Image: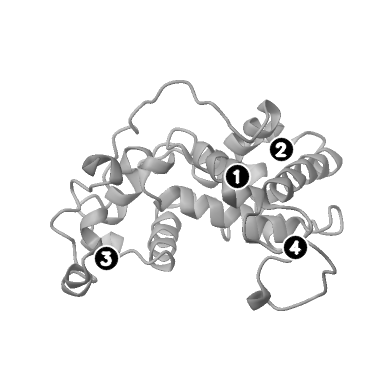
Amino acid sequence: MARSAVNSDLNRRDFLRLSSLAAGAVVPPIAAASPLAGAALPPAAAEGPVTYLALGPDEAFIVERLVDVMCPADDLTPSGTELGLAQFIDRQLAGAFGQGQGLYLRGPFRPGIPEDGYQRPLNPLDFFRHGLHGLDQACRRRRGGGFTDLDAGVADAVLTEVAAGGWDAEQTGLSEWFNDLLYPLFVQACFADPVYGGNRGKAFWRLVGYPGLPAVYSRDMITYRGRPHPAANDPKSIEDFS
C-alpha cells in the first residue's frame, strides 16, 4: 500500500528507512548497512494481558486489525499487534494528547493551512473514534462487512483508497483521519521507545540499525550517519537505564 501496509521486502525496507529519518533517527540504508538486513527477527517479548485504557473492546479490535494490516508478520518483523502497536496508540489517546491538552478546540473553525495546526472541535481521542466508526460503517456499505471481516489483501486495498481520499464521499474526512491521525500514530508506535508500549522487543530499532538512547549524543549522529552504529545489535531503551 502507498503509505501503510508494505508487503514486499523492498517496500517495507523503504518505509522503515524513510519513517525513521522523518522521526529524526540515525538510520543507515537497511539493505546495505544493517546487520539484520534480510534476517528473521525473534518474536517480540511477550507481555501480560493487554489492558486498553481509551478504546472499547470493539474499537480495540479494529485497531488491532489495522496495525496487523499495516505491519503484517513476515521475515522482517512480527505482526503489529505482537509488537504492541495497538497498545501504544491506545496509551497515547488515553493521555494528554488524546484529551487535546494544549490544542485549540473552540470555534469558529475556518479553512486554513497545515501550519495552522489542529483545527477541529473534537479532541484527538474523539476524532480517532469517529474515524474508526466511519471506516467500519463505510466498509459495511462498500464491502459487505466491517473492516475486521475483510481479508488482508482487501483491507490493504481499502486503506490505500482511504489514504488517497477515494472514500471521502462515503465518509467525510476519512482520508484526513487516516493521514493526519492514524498514520502518524502508527509510525510513532513503530519507532518510539518500547517503554511507551510499541516497538516491543525493540524490533524496529534492531531492524534499521538504531542503537536507541546512545544515539542522542551529537558526536554519534555525525560519526555514524549512514553507517552501522556499534551499539545497534543491542539497542538501549529508557527501561534499560531505569
Q: CA distance from mark 4 to mark 3?
A: 33 Å
Residue hosting label 2? 147
Q: Secondary structure at mark 3?
A: loop
Q: Are marks 3 and 2 in contact (CB under 8 Å)?
A: no
Residue hosting label 4? 165
Q: Are marks 2 and 1 in contact (CB under 8 Å)?
A: no
Q: Amino acid at mark 1?
A: Leu
How crowded is the residue under tag 4: few (<14 C-alpha within 10 Å), some, or many (20+)? some
Q: Quadrant of the N terminus?
A: bottom right
Q: CA distance from mark 4 to mark 1?
A: 24 Å
Could you say where residue 176 lies in the image, as x and y percent from the top left?
Answer: 71, 61
Left or right of 161, for residue 235: left
Q: CA distance from mark 3 to mark 2?
A: 36 Å
Residue hosting label 3? 28
How crowded is the residue under tag 2: few (<14 C-alpha within 10 Å), some, or many (20+)? many
Q: CA distance from mark 3 to mark 1?
A: 31 Å
Q: Secondary structure at mark 2?
A: helix
Q: CA distance from mark 4 to mark 2?
A: 17 Å
Could you say where residue 181 lies in the image, as x and y percent from the top left?
Answer: 63, 56
Residue hosting label 1? 93
Q: Amino acid at mark 3?
A: Pro
Q: Secondary structure at mark 4?
A: loop
